Amino acid sequence: MKRSETIVLKELLRCELIENYHVTYQEIEHQEFVLNADGIVRENFSVEKTVTIYRVEGYSTLQKINSYPAENLTMVDLLNILLREYPELFKKAMTKKAV
């Protein structure tokens, strides 16, 4: 049996992005269990850390734009990646400050 559970979900750069865009940090715990003579035993365990960009479509739909593995990313690294790849998502004051 496999089990995945979101253990951390945070919105990042909340006031820095233009309307209808969101950046989230998420940690998902993945576990795999097997049944043997001793009962249920956990066989595999991992934590996946990602940063994802979403666009709001309509009233309640989020469209995933891109996702990045966040295992070794600092906030500064993430900000630099987003400013380089998606400068149009930031409010003008932010892009002028970072350049």
Image (spheres, rainbow, N blue to C red):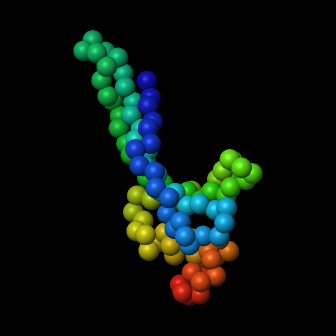
Q: Nearer the viewer, residue 47 or 43?
A: 47
The residue that appears at 59% across and 83% down in the rendered structure is: 93
Q: Which residue lies most toward the top here? A: 37
Q: How many marks?
A: 0
**For the view shown, which residue lies furthest in the right direction?**
58
Is residue 45 in view? Answer: yes
Residue 98 higher or lower than 60, as above or below: below
Indicate left or right for 54 with 11 as reference.
right
Q: Quadrant of the N terminus?
A: top left
The residue drawn where x is 40% and y is 68% is 74
16 vs 6, nearest the viewer:
16
Residue furthest out toward the left: 38
Left/right of residue 44 with respect to residue 23 in the rendered view: left
Q: Image quadrant for the C terminus?
A: bottom right
**Residue 34 image offset from top left, x and y in percent:** 36, 21
Q: Horizontal placement of 42 versus 70: left or right? A: left
The residue positioned 44% from the left and 74% from the top of the image is 76
Which is more toward the observer, 86 or 95? 95
- Tell me if residue 55 comes above or below residue 82 in the rendering: above
Q: Position of residue 63 (x, y in %)?
A: 68, 52
Give residue 57's position: percent from left, percent from top. 73, 53
Q: Identify the residue at horizontal 66%, vertical 50% (top origin).
A: 62
